[in-house]
Image (spheres, rainbow, N blue to C red):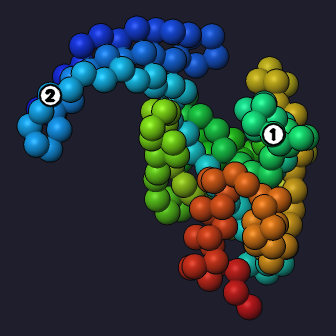
Amino acid sequence: MENNTIKIIQTQVLSDYWYTLHKVTYEYRTRNGEVKTHMREAYDRGNGAVILLYNTTSKKIILTRQFRLPTYINGNESGMMIEACAGLLDENNPEDCIIKETEEETGYKISKVKKVFESYMSPGAVTEILHFFIAEYTPEMKIGEGGGLAEEQEDIEVLELDFDEALAMMASGEIKDAKTILLLQYAQIHCLLLD
């Protein structure tokens, strides 16, 4: 990757327990041509994919609820978060990943997804880029209970909510997850669940 305004001087691994935390020293050429040395930490957890499942007949969506330690540390009393189904890419491409994650987490077997955009979720600290998808679901696609994989220490509750209820939960702050808010707003803007 060639960039004449950035020169990496040193990269040091601070932690590689769950994901990798790097301390990076670099030179940065400002807009006025001055070269400054910066040190920053960057957390590399890989890239991911997220999906909003929606049913145009029932006007319902599928979300999940699970414990998220960082939110608990930062004042979320229960630590529970309501989120759209998501997962890390691992070796899969984004489409294959989200189809696999959907079945593991929600119990719904989908075959057709639509990518709507991609986004860096916390570009000041995390390297991850997230691929956003939507897909229609029907009751017949439910082939299992979902809940995630035990070997990944997942304990995921599957929620089927009225779309209007989910929007109200977003407005009230009950849904605080950024990726989920973006997908709910996408669905609202693009009238995916209008009568």
Residue at figure coordinates x 80%, y 51% from the top left: 82
| Residue placed under numbered mark 1 in the picture | 75
Is 144 left or right of 170, judged from the image as shown?
right
Three-letter amino acid code at the position of disc 2: Val
For label 2, the SS is strand
Query: Which quadrant holds the N terminus?
Result: top left
How many residues crowd mark 1 within 10 Å: few (<14), some (14–19), many (20+)? Answer: few
Furthest residue to the left? 33
Three-letter amino acid code at the position of disc 1: Gly
Query: 139 and 44: which one is in front?
Result: 44
Q: Quadrant of residue 45?
A: top right
Q: Are marks 1 and 2 in contact (CB under 8 Å)?
A: no
Is 163 left or right of 101, judged from the image as shown?
right
Mark 1 or mark 2, earlier in chain? 2
- Look at the image and tell me whether residue 92 can be seen: no
For label 1, the SS is loop
Query: 57 and 75: which one is in front?
Result: 75
- Look at the image and tell me whether residue 83 can be seen: yes
| Residue placed under numbered mark 2 in the picture | 35
Locate residue 99, reporting x and y percent.
Answer: 64, 47
Locate residue 151, reporting x and y percent.
Answer: 80, 20
Query: Which quadrant holds the C terminus?
Result: bottom right
Residue at figure coordinates x 58%, y 70% from the top left: 186
Q: Is residue 134 above or below residue 23?
A: below
Q: Quadrant of residue 189?
A: bottom right
